[in-house]
Image (tube, rainbow, N blue to C red):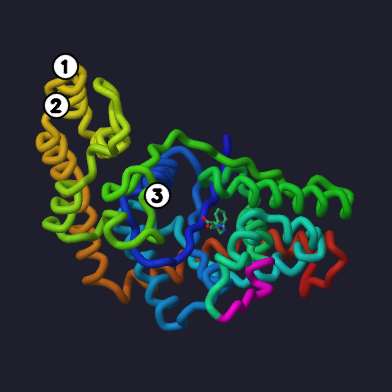
Amino acid sequence: MEKKKVLSCIQPTGDIHYGNYFGAVKNWVDLQEQYDCIYGVVDYHAMTAPYNPIKLRQNTWELIFNLLAIGVKTENLFIQSLIPEHTELCWIFNCFTSYGQLQRMTQFKDKSSDTGKGEDGFISAGLLDYPVLQAADILVYRADFVPVGKDQEQHLELSRNIASRFNQQVGKDYFVLPETLFTETPKIRSTADPLRKMSKSAGEKHYISLFSEEARIRKQVKSAVTDTGETKAGEMSEGVDNLFTLLKASGKIDVHTSLMADFNAGALKYVDLKEAVGAALVDLSQQFAERKLAIMADKKNVKNQIKASSAEIRKRAQETLKEVKDLAGLINVKY
Ligand code: TRP
């Protein structure tokens, strides 16, 4: 039987932290065993808010190198702007998308609100159209499953609406309606403030980068907040819970079990827990760093490989576009 198709994409916004890794990217790596996976770095999406062109290109390659170092396979990885069919399908989809529905999208409302928009108040039409391009990313490969977090559920719903409307108007069940693939992934909190999630937007001390120096990782874990004030005796604070979550997610099950037994006996020393988490993350980061070093030593070649894999993946997108143009009443070069 043919494997089901999985597609997901990530915006090129600099480095990857342990929240992204355990919450999403590790899952991408694991899914490659079971599914036909395609993963994209979506640089067109990164243009929807004011940006710096030099940084955008740098971030795109940096993210590609990082994803490869973490274990995403070269042949599964593409760069969005190397596959023009995404934007071509986006235009066609624009004509099958309700303008009102786009205006009602939560992400658009947040980012175009007084607090969300930048200093000069500029809101691009690209920001409004963002989810239509996302629908094109997914449907151009006729993906069955899209592994994303809960925050993307509304965008997935819109993708299904667009697919249904297209199918209805052309009188054929052409597009598969893509489903969200919710995998149980641990939610990682900021070690500096365990009441909020680990994220880049909160500032440097709130996230632990996968590619940080060993000393920095250890220091960040060592200074993790364990007591948030509100916990009763015997209950676990968010901070301690977060450290246990990191330990388990890192695969150190034995250490996790033994320290948890200490906790339950009321005998846990936070230094021991922090020591264990620090060691676990440093272990992982060292593996990633080693692979990244090898990739960086062969940068030019790796870039060429990604261009080649994008060209290969593009063939699938071209097939879809040819069929879509036929169905939509547009002109194809060849029949
Ligand atoms: N909007 C997604 C995010 O911010 C990124 C994205 C763009 C995406 N295109 C996609 C995710 C297609 C899944 C499928 O995380």
Mark yes or no: residue 302 visible: yes
Residue placed under numbered mark 3 in the picture: 25
User: Are the residues at dot 2 and dot 1 in contact (C-beta closer than 8 Å)?
Assistant: yes
Q: Is residue 5 left or right of residue 16?
A: right
Residue 254 lies within the magenta run:
no
**Residue plotted at (72% across, 47% down):** 160
Q: Quadrant of residue 268?
A: top left
- Give the distance between the C-alpha atoms of the residues marked 2 and 3, in whole angstroms: 31 Å
Instruction: Say which residue appears at 16% left-offset and 20% top-offset.
Output: 266
- Say what amino acid the circle numbered 3 marks: Val
Q: CA distance from mark 3 to mark 1?
A: 35 Å
Query: Is residue 122 one of those drawn in magenta?
Result: yes
Task: Kindly tell me whether mark 3's CB lies below 8 Å from ligand 1.
Answer: no
| Disc 3 secondary structure class | helix
- Few, some or many residues within 10 Å of mark 3 (<14, 14–19, 20+): many
- Which residue was labeled with disc 2? 268
Q: Quadrant of residue 107?
A: bottom right
